Image (cartoon, rainbow, N blue to C red):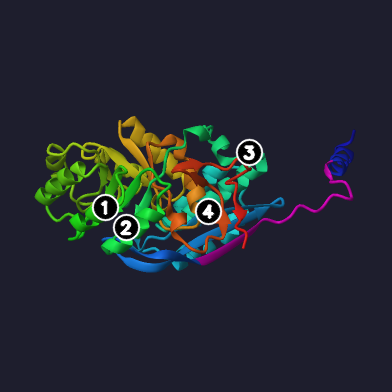
Amino acid sequence: MKRRTFLSTSVLAAAPPADAAPAAKPALVTRIRRLNLRHTWTTVMSSSQYRDTFFVEYSRDGITGIGEGAPIIRYQESAETNRRAIESIRAWLLEQRPEAFVPLMNQVFRRIEGQFAAKAALDIALLDWNAQKLGVPLWRMFGLDPAAAPLTTFSIGIDKAGVIRQKVREAEEFPVLKIKVGLDNDEEVIAAVRSVTKKPLRVDANEGFRTKEEAVAKINWLEKQGVEFIEQPLPAANLEDMNWIRKRVHIPVIADEACLHPQDIPRLAPYFDGVNVKVDKCGGLLEAKRMIEIARSLGLKVMLGCMVSSSVAITAAAHLSPLVDYADLDGNLLIANDPYEGVRVDRGRLILPDRPGLGLRPRPA
Ligand code: MG
């Protein structure tokens, strides 16, 4: 066969049948949604009635993957800066092969500085797209056992005693509660909780204790109140006081604000019993999985936490939850206008969807 004849024949052979639909062009939609909180949410850091989170919808071959990230103000992120970050790489992104999501996300990390909630939204959308394309739930793509998903805590924000009692009653189906402490009214808050329930508690000080002596006194008092572990008693930068504290308390101390990215964990390992991994802090499920593996290799406990967000981000994190000791994935339960449903909770146990991808469905009106 002459070369010219061969080329033209092979092109003909490769051409799609005349009745096949033309390959759909990939599409990318970025959007910001305002999520309304059921209760005003107060921690040491802030008080608010709504949160704006950032969404990415990636479509190709008739499949749409959805992702969400909750921007953290402390790290100079907003839903708008998240959106600008993804829009800045739009043209490049639409030329990439989504199937190779690992090198693709590595490139995204090189192209975008900071803006980890934006990266998380994109990473989740790409993983949702890929798992749907393969026709498997995301936990299956990670090789995990959904039956190993842990209990999740339900968080009770700082509030007046009467409201706290009401929130604890509303959380009746959750066997373990997470309580925010670190303000001047910790005794009042815990007393209000204990007046209505004997459940085990986990507490988060959000860097709220002012001295190592206060931290030790509070932690030992909290242990007597049935608290299983405490998150971030001191400011993130204060590591030198952590060993002094840990020699004087018995419950595990978990790093949250001190632990943002995989490279933080080896430095923190001598000072904490565990780390709180959050998809929005680190920039997606691939980074979160890397953090879980590094923490495990250093003998640390792993908690999977979340920000206030819709079922998109919470379901995404839940797909990794069979890898961790403790889950705190209730951010979607705190909002009144969740646009989706995905992971469910049954008496505190996370129930992962068995539909392809994240397994999201629009929430019926
Ligand atoms: Mg925390």
Q: Quadrant location of residue 270?
A: top left
In this rendering, the answer to whether 88 lies above or below 99 is below
Q: Front-most of 361 and 243?
A: 361
Q: Are marks 2 and 1 in contact (CB under 8 Å)?
A: yes
Identify the residue at the far left of this view.
213
Look at mark 4 in the image and give the residue it sits on: 312
Ranked by sequence position, the earlier of labels 3 and 2 is 3
Ranked by sequence position, the earlier of labels 3 and 4 is 3
Residue at 15% x, 49% y is 218
Q: Quadrant location of residue 220?
A: top left
Q: Which residues are magenta?
A: 14-33
Look at mark 2 in the image and give the residue it sits on: 165
In this rendering, the answer to whether 51 lies above or below 270 is below
Horizontal and vertical percent for residue 162? 29, 63
Horizontal and vertical percent for residue 226? 24, 42
What amino acid does circle 1 point to?
Ser
Q: Which mark is residue 195?
A: 1
Q: Secondary structure at mark 2?
A: helix
Residue at 56% x, 63% y is 30
